[in-house]
């Protein structure tokens, strides 16, 4: 039985869907004002993996991942660029899709843009006001009264007393309580008409937190199975979502909360604010996208992911071993779930999506495949890896893929050197043949001489 670590319960629990055989999943997506970095890539790959496994387990999944296309940072960036918000957000949504596609991330079933759900947000705010949780502050913003929601802090484990102790002095004087957060921001005169909507509380735009509450309830219902996102969203964003949704609807919002760990560089969280982030595009200039996906899945989704070129080099070498085992086999990606290796794979994945252990099963299969050359093992290897979005390319194509910048040799250059070596061998110039082999070996290229000629791979 599938078990999931539930951040709300702070425990690993058996997963029981609300509706038998169906799962409704919502994940907080990107705020589209810049290119995605590896932290965003991890969120996309992790919940793509979760969705793939749920479907492989027989569930009918409705997967929603939103796009935040209205936000202070978006407004500021558009103004700096001298372009409309729509032009800016369309450009970075397209870039996000290109990055996700490269990483083998399947598109969600629904990808709502916040600006398309403002009426639903206003309806939700109206319900909160009616239920006594929302009020209009002196500055005309509409705020959520945190102290009126008895369950506030249940996801993050933060008490109101702790939060009060950490209050800043320069809080908005218009709020009734410094802990209250904004549901609807009153429009500023200088702001573009693009960021202004009419409402019962005056012209303005939604706060960030209300967006996800409105979009998730509209597409998945007021009560659904799984809500996911990065660990950094647990507080205040997800805490505030719970307060809004349960305050408006008077029922449990989400049964299972999943949070993936941070990407870290030199023991610090990777983020734009710290300036230590690497965009997915920069990384893909040096590493094959499947290597990056493998690198992400090699760590358990709740664990920190420590980024370095060295770790990606290790991931490439490991993925190369798997593709090398499949070389020479033309098999379909099918899985016999009654077979021993598949059972071990399922046990790993059912244990809170333990991808490191699931990948270890793939290496066990590859080792036996190298010994036995059994095509049934090749089918299992490709089929199980396919559940994780791996090993679906032609092995030769992967093994001869373009190198990263550090290798310095393109596939065409390697082919030319292999041709020169073959010529040297034909004229019995073995010293030159050995020199070229050693040169390629130093560059990380392994040559394999066989009846069909010489092939090469990156070692």
Image (cartoon, rainbow, N blue to C red):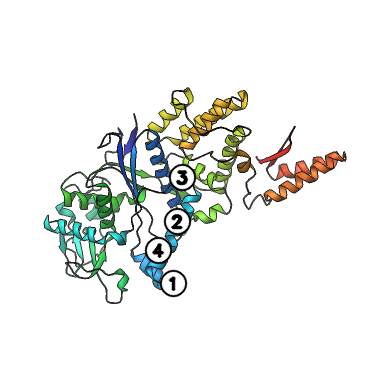
Q: Position of residue 255 (x, y in %)?
A: 25, 40
Name the spot of residue 267 as percent of width and height, x first: 46, 49
Cα separation between marks 2 and 3: 21 Å
Q: Counting residues from the N terminus, which is met first, the one under dot 1 or under dot 4?
A: 1
Mark whose residue sits in front, 4 or 3: 4
The answer for how far apart the CA atoms under marks 4 and 3 are is 28 Å
How far is the residue under mark 1 from the one under mark 4?
12 Å
What is the number of the mark on residue 81? 1
Q: Is residue 264 above or below residue 57?
A: below
Q: Residue at x 27, y 56 (%)?
A: 209
Q: Which residue is mark 4?
A: 89
Give the class, few, some or many, for how many residues have Cα within 10 Å of label 3's Cα (few <14, many ≥20): many
Q: Pinpoint residue 334: horizontal percent, then vertical percent.
A: 49, 31
Could you tell me if the residues under marks 4 and 2 are in contact, i.e. CB atoms within 8 Å?
Answer: no
Q: Residues within 10 Å of mark 4 (few under 14, many from 20)?
A: many
**In the rendered image, which quarter is residue 24 located in?**
top left
Name the N-terminal-most of marks 3 and 1.
1
Per the model, the C-alpha gap separating discs 3 and 1 is 33 Å
The residue under label 2 is 96
């Amino acid at each position: 039985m599938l078990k999931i670590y539930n951040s709300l319960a702070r425990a690993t629990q058996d997963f029981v869907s609300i509706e038998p055989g169906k799962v409704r999943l919502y994940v907080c997506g990107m705020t589209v004002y810049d290119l995605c970095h590896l932290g965003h890539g991890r969120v996309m790959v992790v919940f793509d993996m979760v969705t793939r496994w749920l479907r492989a387990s027989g569930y009918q999944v409705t997967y929603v991942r939103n796009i935040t296309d209205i936000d202070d940072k978006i407004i500021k960036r558009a103004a700096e660029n001298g372009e409309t918000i729509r032009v800016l957000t369309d450009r970075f949504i397209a870039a996000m899709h290109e990055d996700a596609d490269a990483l083998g991330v399947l598109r969600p079933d629904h990808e709502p843009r916040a600006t398309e759900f403002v009426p639903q947000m206003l309806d939700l705010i109206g319900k909160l006001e009616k239920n006594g949780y929302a009020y209009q502050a002196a500055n005309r913003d509409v705020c959520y009264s945190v102290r009126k929601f008895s369950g506030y802090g249940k996801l993050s484990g933060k008490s109101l007393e702790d939060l009060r102790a950490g209050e800043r002095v320069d809080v908005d004087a218009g709020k009734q309580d410094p802990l209250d957060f904004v549901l609807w921001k009153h429009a500023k005169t200088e702001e573009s008409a693009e960021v202004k909507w009419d409402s019962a509380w005056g012209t303005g735009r939604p706060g960030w937190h209300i967006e996800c509450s409105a979009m998730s309830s509209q597409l998945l219902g007021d009560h659904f199975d799984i809500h996911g996102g990065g660990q950094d969203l647990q507080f205040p964003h997800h805490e505030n979502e719970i307060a809004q949704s349960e305050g408006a609807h008077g029922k449990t919002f989400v049964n299972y909360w999943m949070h993936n760990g941070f990407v870290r560089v030199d023991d610090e969280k990777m983020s734009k604010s710290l300036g230590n982030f690497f965009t997915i595009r920069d990384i893909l200039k040096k590493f094959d996208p499947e290597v990056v996906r493998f690198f992400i899945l090699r760590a358990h989704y709740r664990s920190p992911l420590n980024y370095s070129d060295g770790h990606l080099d290790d991931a490439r070498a490991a993925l190369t071993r798997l593709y090398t085992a499949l070389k020479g086999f033309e098999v379909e990606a099918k899985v016999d779930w009654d077979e021993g290796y598949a059972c071990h794979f399922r046990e790993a994945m059912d244990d809170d999506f333990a991808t490191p252990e699931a990948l270890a099963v793939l290496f066990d299969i590859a080792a036996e495949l190298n010994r036995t050359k059994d095509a049934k093992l090749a089918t299992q290897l490709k089929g199980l890896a396919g559940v994780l979005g791996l090993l679906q390319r032609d092995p030769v194509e992967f093994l001869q893929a373009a190198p990263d910048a550090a290798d310095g040799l393109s596939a065409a250059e390697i082919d030319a050197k292999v041709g020169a070596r073959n010529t040297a061998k034909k004229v019995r110039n073995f010293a030159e043949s050995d020199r070229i082999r050693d040169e390629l070996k130093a560059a990380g290229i392994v040559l394999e001489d066989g009846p069909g000629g010489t092939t090469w791979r990156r070692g």
